[in-house]
Amino acid sequence: MSLIKQKSNWELLKHGLFGENTIFRMAISLCPAIAVTNSLKNGITLGVAVVFVQVMVNVTVSALRNFIHPKIRIPIFMFIIAGYVSIIDMVMAAYAREAYREIGLYIQIIVAFASIFARAEVFASKNRLDKAFFDGLGMGVGFLLAMIVISFFRELLGKGTLFGFPVVAGKPLLIMILPAGGFLAVGLLMGFFNWIDIRFYGGKGASGAA
Amino acid sequence: MRPIDMMKITLNLVIVYVMGGLLIAFVYSKASPVMYRKAQEEKQAALKTMTPEADIIDKLGDWEPHEKHAEYYIAKKCGELKVEMVKDEKTGEEREVKRCLNETEIGYIVESYGKGYSSYINVLVAVDKEYVVQKVNVLHHAETPGLGDEIERDYFLNQFAGKTVEHLVVVKKETKEDIQAITGATISSRAVTEDAVKNAVLMIKGTAQEGSTGHQG
């Protein structure tokens, strides 16, 4: 029915990981990405929460896509997203207290992530369950990978540590763990990935789908 | 809009919201006891590290620094500590009850807040019976990473041990008598020293001298 050829699950996964990576390609959800990436542990915690919410929202929306009346799909998507965010929020508050104390606020803010809502509306509400699952997984893990890369460099340069363990001796570059350093890190990494894209893939995107 | 659409929409909303509500309620019922228990344990552990020699830490009352709720406690040491197993009549479970004989009060622990550079700094202060500061611990804050967050470090907090209230003053040069400011974080250092800790010591001094277990309105 659709004009474009139905993509395989692997293509969907790659698409989310590289071709339409939330941070480096779409440049959305940057606010939490900059706020929590001052340490590797925080970055990974938020990334994992996003993977959970993205996958569960995609699967639920896809499963209910023939049941939801088109006129009220937006409030229902919002409710589904808010529900899963509440769940991951409570689970982390109970079982990952250390990290939750630092980034709890940003877990709740996942409700307003453009990337999650966009995938529910654009993809999951129009596609089969398995396709929606792989799309959500690709998008979520793409976000997680971006968080790992950004927070790796920021913690290493800004504090000279990784996961809180000292790695580099000497005075760290303090600016890297301040908000300004977040913009610097994201901008430089985005430029680096664009350079790779143009140099090796002729500007078509690493997945060949951009 | 046709009546059938109205029906469908109503049904949609009701079913999705009820299902979602049930799911959230289920997770909450599992997670909330764990959350509560861990928060209590963390609080007890935090109090315990404040006065390691105390056997019993009892709540004395509440006070409100910066319109925030905070508690203060009394630390007691037991001449003799008896641990008894008591059977709960309702549940039939056995639990440990510590009984303290010949207890002596060794000091107070006060929770306090100070207005920092970008947040309220939440601290615990332990003082002895002469209101000399024994230990200060930062529980929570959101000061600037790399500058203000140095208030958590031992080199800053260790300065507080043995200070009386007159010496809770921040100075910007090297000092043994007073508290030395952290380079680049004078406001955060002041907030901890002259706001949070000093007010806590003054409060407990006032309250404890007024009456033994008086509450402050």
Image (cartoon, coloured by chain):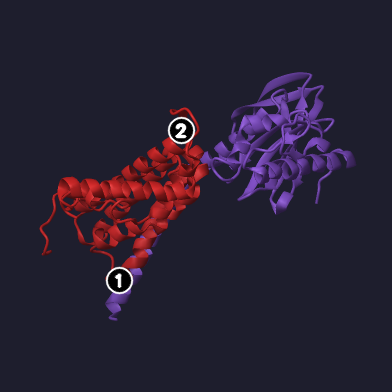
> At numbered mark 1, what does the secondary structure look like: helix, strand or loop?
helix
Camera-side mark, 2 or 1: 2
The amino acid sitting under disc 1 is Lys
**Which shade is chain B?**
purple
Which residue occupies 81% across, 48% down?
Answer: B216
Q: Position of residue B51 (x, y in %)?
A: 71, 27
Q: Position of residue B141 (x, y in %)?
A: 60, 44
Considering every residue shown, the one lying at the far right of the view is: B210
- Total marks in image: 2
Q: Are marks 2 and 1 on the same chain?
A: no
Q: Tell me the CA gap for discs 2 and 1.
A: 58 Å
Question: Image quarter for residue B175?
Answer: top right
> At numbered mark 2, what does the secondary structure look like: helix, strand or loop?
loop
Residue highlighted by disc 1: B8
Considering every residue shown, the one lying at the far top of the view is: B80
Q: Which mark is residue B68?
A: none
Rate crowding at label 1 as few (under 14), some (14 to 19) or many (20 or more) other CA atoms within 10 Å: some
The amino acid sitting under disc 2 is Gly
Chain of the residue under label 2: A
Chain of the residue under label 1: B
Which residue occupies 86% across, 38% down?
Answer: B212
Considering every residue shown, the one lying at the far bottom of the view is: B1
Q: Position of residue A169 (x, y in %)?
A: 47, 27
Which residue occupies 30% across, 60% down?
Answer: A118
Question: Image quarter for residue B1?
Answer: bottom left
Rate crowding at label 2 as few (under 14), some (14 to 19) or many (20 or more) other CA atoms within 10 Å: many
Residue highlighted by disc 2: A160
